[in-house]
Amino acid sequence: MRWIAAFTDTPAMLQVRAELAAAHLAYLDRHASEIVLAGGCRHSPESDYMGGLWVLEVADRARAVQLVEQDPYFLSAARRYELRTWGKAFPERLVTL
């Protein structure tokens, strides 16, 4: 099943990103088979990050929650998230980003 996790950062997250970026990226890498796409969101290219988005391919919602809530960024308590199921239009089309 495919899920998206939409993250919203608190102001404290700027410092958390500076301190935990390496641990966060290592976490994403360890779970690349389930967190298939991840990245930060900004209001404009020159502004600070204000959140993020993941696309997850997992068995169920419980596994999506587990992955989100074990991420070093989330453990800092400086961000919140919303989970939604997601279905890709034209599922037969492969997408490379």
Image (tube, helix red, strand yellow):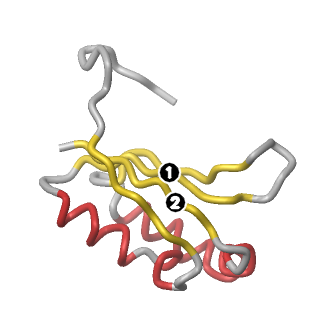
Cα separation between marks 1 and 2 = 6 Å
SS class, disc 2 = strand
- Going by the picture, which residue comes out furthest to the right? 46
**Residue 76, position as x, y percentages in the image:** 54, 85
Would residue 25 be found to the left or right of residue 55 on screen? right
| Residue in front for this viewpoint, 25 or 79 | 79
Q: Amino acid at mark 2?
A: Phe
What residue sits right under mark 1 in the picture? 53
- Which residue is labeled 2 in the image? 7
**Circle count:** 2
47 horizontally vs 75: left or right: right
Local packing at callout 2 (Cα closer than 10 Å; few below 14, some 14-19, many 20+) is many
**Point 25% across, 47% down: residue:** 57
| Residue 31 to residue 15: above or below | above
- Circles 1 and 2 in contact, beta carbons < 8 Å: yes
Which residue of the protein is positioned furthest toward the left in this rendering? 59
Residue 61, picture quadrant = bottom left
Residue at the location (43% across, 45% down)? Answer: 37
Under circle 1, the secondary element is strand
Question: Image quadrant for the N terminus?
Answer: top left
Image vertical order of residue 58 relative to residue 68, above or below: above
Image spot of residue 78 (x, y percent)? 59, 79
Q: Residues within 10 Å of mark 1 (few under 14, many from 20)?
A: some
Position of residue 15 relative to residue 65, above or below, is below
